[in-house]
Amino acid sequence: MLSDIQRANLLTNLPKLKDFPRRYNRARSWLIRFEVWNLAVICLTLIGFSVVPTLACFSGMSAALLCLIAVGTAAITVWCVAVWTRETST
């Protein structure tokens, strides 16, 4: 049997379960997008390694673009970890 405190907690938290499918699908969608981004960056990095001598001959614009991509990847990763590990009140 449930104690009065457990019963009160159950009645308080039960409505939150109704929203679970939407929250699950949203999290799954963002996780897929994040993984696609990571795989794309990994793929482009591997391709980039094969053309390092050619990239070394390009102007600073290319280096700036590669730096921007690297910083963007790191920022997205940090943001995703922060969002997924954040405690929610709902």
Image (cartoon, rainbow, N blue to C red):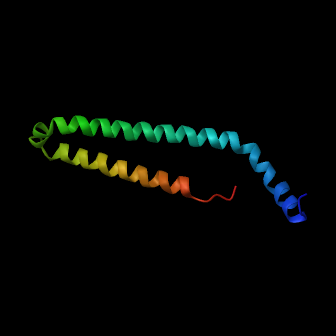
Estimate the x, y position of residue 69 in percent, counting from the top left.
30, 45
Estimate the x, y position of residue 53 in percent, counting from the top left.
10, 39
Relative to 54, is 34 on the left or the right? right
Outermost residue toward the bottom in this view? 5
Examine the image and state in which quarter residue 3 appears. bottom right
Examine the image and state in which quarter residue 7 appears. bottom right
Q: For this rendering, which residue is in front, 36 or 71? A: 36
Q: For this rendering, which residue is in front, 19 or 6? A: 6
Label count reads: 0
Estimate the x, y position of residue 58 in percent, counting from the top left.
12, 41
Q: Residue at x 80, y 50 (%)?
A: 14
Q: Residue at x 54, y 52 (%)?
A: 84
Q: Residue at x 14, y 40 (%)?
A: 52
Outermost residue toward the front in this view? 1
Q: Residue at x 11, y 37 (%)?
A: 54
**Image quadrant occupied by the N terminus:** bottom right
**Image quadrant occupied by the C terminus:** bottom right
Examine the image and state in which quarter residue 18 appears. top right
Relative to 11, is 18 on the left or the right? left
Estimate the x, y position of residue 60 in percent, counting from the top left.
15, 47
Relative to 82, is 17 on the left or the right? right
Relative to 74, is 60 on the left or the right? left
Q: Is residue 75 above or below residue 6?
A: above
